Image (cartoon, rainbow, N blue to C red):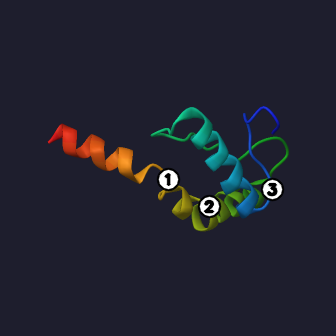
Amino acid sequence: MESATCFAGTPDDVYTQIKGLNDRVGGFGHLLFFGQGGFLDHADTVANITLFAKAVLPRLRELNREPVKAAIAAAQ
């Protein structure tokens, strides 16, 4: 986590970690999410992905709003 190559913790922790990386690199358009690993069984994997989708993803959509709007306008 110190190298910002993976994120873990509460939904607030994960959002803060992803936002920090986003700010450091100047924003990004895509995020690859790996919600299963190690010994997580199916039920825990579904719970993990669902929690991310409900508690983290909506907040991430607010990042980089202006660059996205500018890119859309430029493409039109």
Q: Residues within 10 Å of mark 2 (few under 14, many from 20)?
A: some
Q: Position of residue 14 (x, y in %)?
A: 71, 54
- Whichever of callouts 2 and 1 sits on the residue coming sooner in the sequence is 2
The residue closer to the viewer here, 32 or 61, is 61
Q: What residue occupies the far right of the structure in this picture?
A: 39
Q: Residues within 10 Å of mark 1 (few under 14, many from 20)?
A: some
- Real-space CA distance between mark 3 and mark 1, rounded to the nearest whole angstrom: 20 Å
Is residue 69 positioned above or below 56 on the image? above
Residue carrying label 2:
56
Identify the mark nearer the N-term, 3 or 1: 3
Identify the residue at image location x=19%, y=38%: 75
Q: Is residue 74 left or right of residue 67?
A: left
Of the two numbered discs 3 and 1 in the rendering, the one whose residue sits closer to the viewer: 1
Say whether residue 73 is left or right of residue 66: left
> Type of residue at label 1?
Leu
* Above or below, 38 relative to 8: above
* Residue holding disc 3: 9
Q: Residue at x 25, y 45 (%)?
A: 72
Q: Amino acid at mark 3?
A: Gly
Estimate the x, y position of residue 45 in percent, counting from the top left. 72, 55
Residue designated by label 1: 63
In this view, the residue farthest toward the left is 76
Residue 43, above or below 28:
below
Quarter-of-image position of residue 71: top left
Q: Nearer the viewer, residue 40 or 75?
A: 75
In three-dimensional space, the C-alpha distance between marks 2 and 3, rounded to whole angstroms, equals: 11 Å
